[in-house]
Image (tube, rainbow, N blue to C red):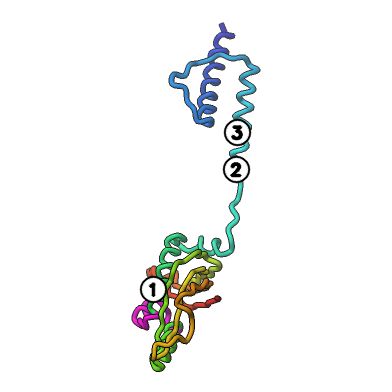
Amino acid sequence: MSAYIDLFFLGIVVLLILFRLNNVLGTRPEQPKIKIISKQDFEKIYDLIHKENEEQEKFEDIKVNLSPAESVLSTISGFDKNDFLKRASKVFEMVLEAFASQDKETLKMLTDSKLYDKFEAIIDERKAKGITVESDLIRIETMEIIDAKVSAKGKAQIVVKFESEQINVLKDADGKLIEGDENFVQKISDTWTFEKNINTPSHVWLLTSTKKKL
């Protein structure tokens, strides 16, 4: 009688193991039944599940290596990389358009005071000379965060590299071409820096620096 009891309990254990194995393989029998199998087969199934557990533990121990910039960004509470880049691309478009059209109000809203002063000086100089700008952003090909810093006082900096296609033309007061080509699309690499104080409730990242490479 005790031998039959041992076989019965062995069958229950095998059923539980089979349930787990079926979950791992992605299948599940419609009407599971208790099967009494040999001790040798039981040990094979046990070894298989034990091996699967070891592989899972190895996977969970894998550490994801973050870039220096990503490591910094991970310390900023509530920061969403995709959302930030989406907003940064919009600012990129708006600043290029505002600078070309001499829209100081928009530039003042999107930049810090030092960068705004530089933009304003260039705009005023061109205006005094009667120079006009025609700028067309064809598309942003790629953009990526290439650097990030957070100071001890909570000032965060994020540097974004934009690769874009643009048409930029300068004309004098008589409408004559000074610089650029209306039929030539330039591939331009811009490196822009955005800043904000992460200790304040504001979600606004101001543009503080722009560098262009043709």
Query: In the rendered image, is residue 117 in sight?
Result: no
**Secondary structure beneath disc 3?**
helix
- Prevalent SS, magenta region: helix
* Outermost bottom residue: 128
User: How far apart are the two marked residues, 2 and 1, measured between alpha carbons?
Assistant: 45 Å
Mark 2 crowdedness (10 Å alpha carbons): few <14, some 14-19, many ≥20: few
Residue 52's tag is: 3
Left or right, 33 with respect to 61, comes to left
User: How far apart are the two marked residues, 3 and 2, measured between alpha carbons?
Assistant: 11 Å
Residue 40 drawn at (x, y percent) = 65, 17
**Residue 45 belongs to magenta span:** no
Q: Residue visible at 58% across and 44% down?
A: 60
Residue 59's tag is: 2
**Secondary structure beneath disc 1?**
helix
Sequence-first tag of 2 and 1: 2
User: Which residue is label 1 attached to?
Assistant: 94
Residue 148 drawn at (x, y percent) = 53, 68
Mark 3 crowdedness (10 Å alpha carbons): few <14, some 14-19, many ≥20: some
Sequence-first tag of 3 and 1: 3
User: How far apart are the two marked residues, 3 and 1, measured between alpha carbons?
Assistant: 54 Å
Q: Nearer the viewer, residue 92 or 129?
A: 129
Q: Residue visible at 42% across and 77% down?
A: 135
Q: Amino acid at mark 2?
A: Phe
**Residue 113 belongs to magenta span:** yes
User: Image quadrant for the N terminus?
Assistant: top right
Q: Cβ–Cβ below 8 Å for labels 2 and 1?
A: no
* Outermost right residue: 40
Q: Amino acid at mark 1?
A: Met
Q: Amino acid at mark 3?
A: Glu
